Amino acid sequence: MPTLMIEYADDTERLALEQAIAFVTERRQLAATAPESTVLAACEQAALHQGRALLRHVLAAAVPSRSDNDSLPRTTLFSLPGLWSFP
């Protein structure tokens, strides 16, 4: 199984990354279990509703995090090879 290594600046960023990974994982599971000829519609519907919620949460968390960390240097390594490949 492939390994993913992510460096993050703080717990807020870590949580956002974990939620994004979970979001993608859930879409893949939905695609694998949806009845034939409904995969795209099912994934689009879930992505619209849950994607908006994820975006709202990440943006809401970013505002206080931004003010707390304005003076800190940022170094982030983010690599997701193969995450978007479907069997």
Image: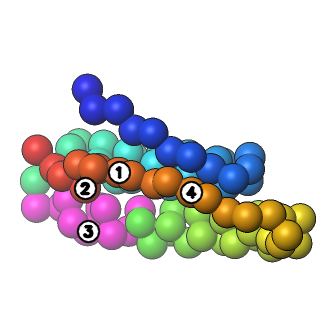
Q: Is residue 52 a member of the stretch shown in magenta? A: no
* Mark 4, secondary structure of its residue: loop
Which label sits in the foreground, 1 or 4? 4
Identity of the residue drawn at 35% across and 51% down: 80
Q: How many marks?
A: 4
Position of residue 22 measured from the top left corner of the image (x, y, whole percent) = 47, 46
Q: Of discs 4 and 3, which sits in the foreground?
A: 4
Residue 76 is tagged as 4
Q: How much space separates mark 4 and mark 3, taking CA atoms?
A: 34 Å
Where does label 1 land, which residue? 80
Q: Amino acid at mark 2?
A: Trp
Residue 1 falls in image quadrant: top left
Residue 14 is left or right of residue 70, and the answer is left
Identify the mark nearer the N-term, 2 or 3: 3
Residue at 30% across / 61% down in the picture? 42
Which quadrant of the figure contains the C terminus?
A: top left
Q: Where are the magenta residues, as a range?
A: 37-46
Q: Is residue 53 visible?
A: no
Residue placed under numbered mark 2 in the picture: 84
Residue 79 in view (yes/no)? yes
Residue 66 lies left or right of residue 16; in this view the side is right
- Work out how far the residue at label 1 is from the one at label 4, CA to CA, in angstroms: 13 Å
Bin the neighbour count of mark 4 within 10 Å (Cα to Cα): few under 14, some 14-19, many 20 and up: few
- The numbered mark at residue 41 is 3
Q: Position of residue 65 (x, y in %)?
A: 81, 64
Residue 22 drawn above or below residue 3? below
